[in-house]
Image: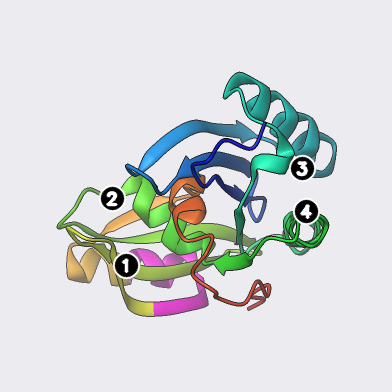
Amino acid sequence: MNDAAPLHLGLDTSTAWLALSLYSPVGDTVLANEVVRAEREHAALLLPLLQETLARAGREVGDITAIGAGTGPGSYTGLRVGLASAAGLAAGLGVPLSGVSSLEAAAFAALRPGKTGWPAFDARRGNAYAARIRRTASGLAVLVPPRKISWEELGRLAGERGDTLLRDPAPSAVWTAARAAAGEAATALYL
């Protein structure tokens, strides 16, 4: 089909969520957005969901002009599934691939402009992967970079600062797709 408008694919499989979005930077247009609780089924769900989403949007895989992939932190296996799939698609299509922080994508989805919060993913054994992020009118500001921290300490920090603690938020694949051509390395963040 190859519609003249650029088509960015955003995907994130770093957490229990599978987030996928089709986005055009022309007019800042979201063509499709899917968020599914995948648990450990990312590998089985990702490509069929992509095919269904492209069909619903009236587009084809060959229409994709850039890919953004969530880089975590998160599940080792989930990150491998998403980043390997994104890298394979980008190489096969000859399009750019950019990595996007999954914590930033989650903050974008969960926070309103002007709000600060700690998006946090389960890191097991009483720990979380978290970052302190403020949503601004034009995007996001990372105030405390991603780290592995106990849920107890994270709750204390959020409470002291009056920040929102966001437990297990789904990353926004729209945010990831919008940054698909940004040129950031698509390298997994393991903490």
How far is the residue under mark 4 from the one under mark 2? Answer: 31 Å
Q: Nearer the viewer, residue 109 or 165?
A: 109
Say left or right for 110 vs 122: left
**Numbered circle sitting on residue 111:** 2
Q: Position of residue 140 (x, y in %)?
A: 30, 65
Q: Position of residue 22 (x, y in %)?
A: 54, 39
Q: Nearer the viewer, residue 34 or 57?
A: 57
Front tag of 4 and 3: 4
Residue at which label 3 appears: 42
Residue at which label 4 appears: 89
| Circles 2 and 3: CB atoms closer than 8 Å | no
Dot 2: what SS? Answer: loop
**Numbered circle sitting on residue 110:** none
Q: Residue at x 50, y 49 (%)?
A: 171
How far is the residue under mark 3 from the one under mark 1? Answer: 27 Å
Q: Is residue 73 visible?
A: no
Dot 1: what SS? Answer: strand
Q: Is residue 149 magenta?
A: yes
Q: Position of residue 62 (x, y in %)?
A: 72, 42
Say left or right for 89 vs 28: right
Q: Position of residue 116 (x, y in %)?
A: 23, 62
Of pointers 3 and 1, the one earlier in the residue sequence = 3
How far is the residue under mark 1 from the one under mark 4? Answer: 30 Å
Q: Is residue 164 magenta?
A: no
| Circles 3 and 1: CB atoms closer than 8 Å | no
Residue at which label 1 appears: 133
Q: Which residues are magenta?
A: 145-156
Q: Residue at x 71, y 60 (%)?
A: 75
Q: Nearer the viewer, residue 119 or 102?
A: 102
Q: Residue at x 23, y 61 (%)?
A: 163
